[in-house]
Image (spheres, helix red, strand yellow):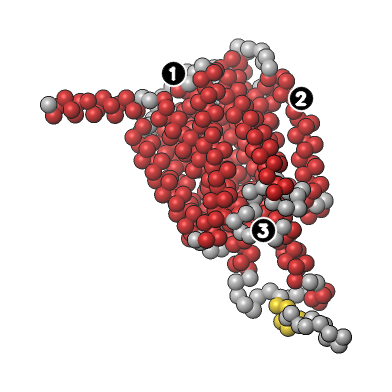
Amino acid sequence: MTEVSGWSCGARFEGCRKSRRLVIIVVSTALLLDSMLLATIVPIIPEFLYNIRHREPDEGIRFEAAKLSTTETPFVTSIPANMDAAMTTKAPRRLKHDELVDETYEIGFMLASKVVVQLLANPFVGPLTNRIGYSIPMFTGLVIIFVSSTIFAYGRSFSVLFLARALHGIASSCLSVAGMGMVAERYPGDKERGNAMAVALGGLALGVLVGPPFGGLMYQFVGKREPFLYLAALALGVGFLQLLVVQPEIVRRSLEAPSLIALLTDPYIMVAAGAIAFVNMGITMLEPSLPIHMMDTLNAPKWLPNWEIPLATSFNQLIAPNVGIGFAIGMVVSSMMPELGRLVDIRHTGEVYGSVYAIGDVAFNLGFAIGPILSGILVKNIGFEWMLVAIAIISLAYAPALFLLRAPPTHQRGPVENLL
C-alpha cells in the first residue's frame, strides 16, 4: 500500500513538472517580481535621496517665518558656506523646485543603469539559452533578484542603491529571455502561444501597476526597508516553485539556432522590436520626471507620485491618461512578443527562441534606458508639458510601420546566416 501511495505521489509530481500551466505560473510570477522591483523604487528613490541630503538640521537653507510689518522683512538665519549669494534671495519653494529638477538627472541615471546593464547582458544570455536551455538562466535570475532586493533594503547611499539597480539588470535579462523562450517552446501554435504569453506578460503588467503604490505606501507608513524585504521573500518563493516545476539542468538542442546577425538583419523583426522600444520609451520618460512634477506642482505625498500622468492640475485629471498609456503598452507588448516567435518560425529555424527574445528584451529595455536620461534633459530644457508632446509625436510617427507585419513573407535560411 505504501509503495502504491509513493508511486502515486511520484506520478503526480512528474505530472506537475510536465504541466504547461505551471510553467506559465512560474514565468508570470517571476516577471511580476521583476517588474514590481522595477516599479517599487520609483516613488521611493526621489524622496529618499532628497531626505538623505537634508537629514541634518544644519544642512540646506533655513528660513525664519518672521512676521511682516512696515519695518520688518523675512531674513535668512543660516546659509551654507558654499552657496552663491544670489541664491539667498530665492524663496524656499523655489529653491526646493530647483533641487528637485536637478535631482531628476541622478534619478534618471539610476533608473537607466538597470536597463543599460540588461542591454549589455542580453547578447550573452540569449545565445546561452540556445546552448544550455532556459531553466538555469531562469533560476540564476531569481537568485540575483533576491540579492538585489536585499541590497535595496539596507542601502543608505546613492552608490549602493546604484549597484543594486545594476544587479537587477542582470536578473531581468535572465528572467525575461529565459521566461519568454520557455513559454514559446511549450506553446508552438500561434494562437495558444499568444494566449500563453498574454498571461505571462500579465504578470509583468501587474507588477508595473502594483509596484508604485506598494512601494509608496510601504515607504510612507512602514519604512524603506520593508517593501524590498517582501520582494526578496517573494524571490525565494518563486525559486522554490521553479525547483518543483522546472529543475535547473542543461538541455542540448538538436536544431541549430538562428544567428544574431540573421535576426538583427531581418527587417520584420526590427519593426516588431522597434514598436516595443518606442512604447516603453513613452512611459519611462515619465518615471523620473512625474514624481518630481507631482511633488513640485501638486504637493503630492510620498505614496502618490507616479500613479498617474501629468498635464493636469489635480490627481483626478491624471487617472484617464494613465489608464490609456497602460492599455496601449499592454496591447503592443502582448502582441509583439508572440510576433517575434512567429517570425522565427516562418522566416528562420523555428523552436529555438533565445536569441530573438534577447532582441525583444533589448528593445524593451532600450526604451527604459533612453527614456529616463532623455526625460531629465528635456524637462530641464523644454519643460514637462513639451516633453509629453514629443512622446506623442514619436509614437504617431512610428505606428504606420506596423502594417508591414500583417503578412510577412517566409524565408529559407541561407549559408550567410550560419555565421556567428
User: Can you identify the residue that label 1 sits on?
Assistant: 254
Q: Is residue 345 above or below residue 398?
A: above
Is the residue marked by circle 2 packed among few (<14), some (14-19), or many (20+) residues within 10 Å?
few
User: Can you identify the residue that label 2 sits on?
Assistant: 400
Q: Nearer the viewer, mark 3 or mark 1?
A: 3
Query: Nearer the N terminus, badge 3 or badge 2?
Result: 3
Whole-percent x, y for residue 132 in the image: 43, 30
User: Can you identify the residue that label 3 sits on?
Assistant: 300
Whole-percent x, y for residue 29 in the image: 46, 38
Point 49% across, 18% down: residue:
188
Q: Residue furthest front?
A: 316
Give the residue type that dot 1 points to: Ser
Point 28% across, 26% down: residue:
12
Q: Nearer the viewer, mark 2 or mark 1?
A: 2
CA separation, marks 3 and 1? 57 Å
Quick check: marks 3 and 1 in contact, CB under 8 Å? no
Q: Nearer the viewer, mark 3 or mark 2?
A: 3
Circle 2 SS class:
helix
Q: Is residue 269 left or right of residue 227?
A: right
